[in-house]
Amino acid sequence: MEIRDLKGVHSAREFVWWYNGHPDGRNLDPDLKNTDTAVILGQGNVALDVARILLRPTSELAITDIASHALTALEQSSIRKVYLVGRRGPVQAACTAKELREVLGIKDLYIHIKETDLKITPADELLIHSIYVFAIYMLSFFMKEEMKNSRIHRRIYELLSKAATAGPSQPSSGQRELHFVFFRQPDRFLESYDKKGYVSGVHLEKTALKGIGSGNQIAIGTGQFENLSCGCSFCFGNLMLTMLWNCTVMCASCRIVLKSIGYKSVPVDDLPFDNQKGVVPNVKGRVLSDNSGDPTSIENGLYVCGWLKRGPTGIIATNLYCAEETVASLSEDLELGVLASTTRLLKLGRDGLLQILDNRNVRVVPFSAWERIDKEEKRLGSLRNKPREKLTSWEELLKVAGSE
């Protein structure tokens, strides 16, 4: 994708930090007033959560723990339409059913999905029907995850299909809208004609699915392009379709595009790394010395967890299971004596770590200090009928953490 440094283009991570009260995101200041439409690139759980925040009534958000500065901005927001753009189809959507149900359950929300996008291919059938996957599972233990994924994909497809047919064919006046745009990938951001340096839309390429074996499909570009603009889009109701080789289009002003199209870990110095997968090669959390997958090439005493271990997949519960697996490997190695010290010197442990941090002038916030922060946020929240009022600056957090 061609990258241009245009104002109004933000990463979804920054936006999530902004409304969740992360100190590093409090000054993001997204422009929600000067356009009625936001474009979100991606259809995973983070993308859905961003769409939910933009479209959910602020009266409902007001009793959550959303950051106060974000709530104020959302109360003044002009956003009424959100487009979720994905490279593949509804069968391959990267979200989970729980998060999808939450956004589809927003009150008085118009949902639009093109009927043609809901047509499934034979390869899609293989993915969403567990009989096929079960047969493979019987042949290989490692297909257990595929079986679980099949149920997830089937449920997501069912939810999207129901949402596409349950509501009216057109939105009512003033109704908030959520448009799922499948089989499109971003090519470049478009700059505003009347406001230089600002985004005015996204240049999209149509995609098609290509089978790569075992029922898996990837999106490939077709060489056909469209403009999706914040304020106008393609052939949804009274919106405008643009095929760039046939005509031009006048686009309404656009101010916000949010990128939620994946994450890839970066190598750590002197640590084995699989650049293609973006993970540290491992077996159940035990780091391997190379990418061969050979379980005998284990780096004793070295372990990995989370996205660096398995890639950017899953939800919080997935991380819990991932951590448990790594800790189980570590515990097993301890019991077997694999981690026995090669030196008789006494290791300093926690005290030694604290000494190193102190030498580097790193301030440590212990759990007891976090508890003071937690208590203060809950106290402030109770004054506003909220679960908590988040402290959104490092100064505030450290001040409360240091109080006795």
Image (spheres, rainbow, N blue to C red):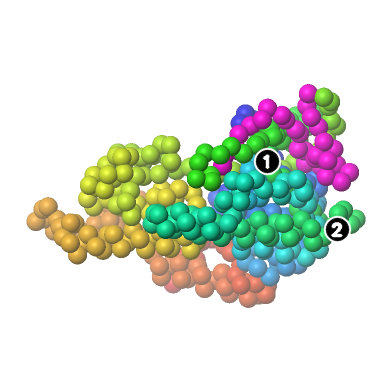
- Which element carries disc 2, helix, strand or loop? loop
* Residue closer to the observer: 284 or 248: 284
Q: Residue at x 86, y 54 (%)?
A: 169
* Residue closer to the observer: 74 or 115: 115
Is residue 199 located in the magenta-colored stretch of the structure? Answer: no
Q: Mark 1: few, some, or many residues within 10 Å (few <14, many ≥20)? A: many
Please identify the quarter of the rendering in which residue 58 is found: bottom right
Asked whether the viewer can see residue 70, the reply is no
Please identify the quarter of the rendering in which residue 366 is found: bottom left
Please identify the quarter of the rendering in which residue 143 is found: bottom left
Residue 19 x, y percent position in the rendering = 63, 56
Query: In this picture, is 377 found above or below 257?
Result: below
Is residue 230 located in the magenta-colored stretch of the structure? Answer: yes
- Which element carries disc 1, helix, strand or loop? loop
Q: Quadrant of the C terminus?
A: bottom left
Give the residue type at disc 2: Pro
Q: Mark 2: few, some, or many residues within 10 Å (few <14, many ≥20)? A: few
Is residue 363 shown left or right of residue 16? left
Dot label at residue 168 = 2
Earlier in the chain: of badge 1 and badge 2, it is: 2
Q: Which residue is mark 1?
A: 183
Query: In this picture, is 377 found above or below 136?
Result: below
- Magenta stretch bounds: 217-245
Is residue 131 shown left or right of residue 233? left
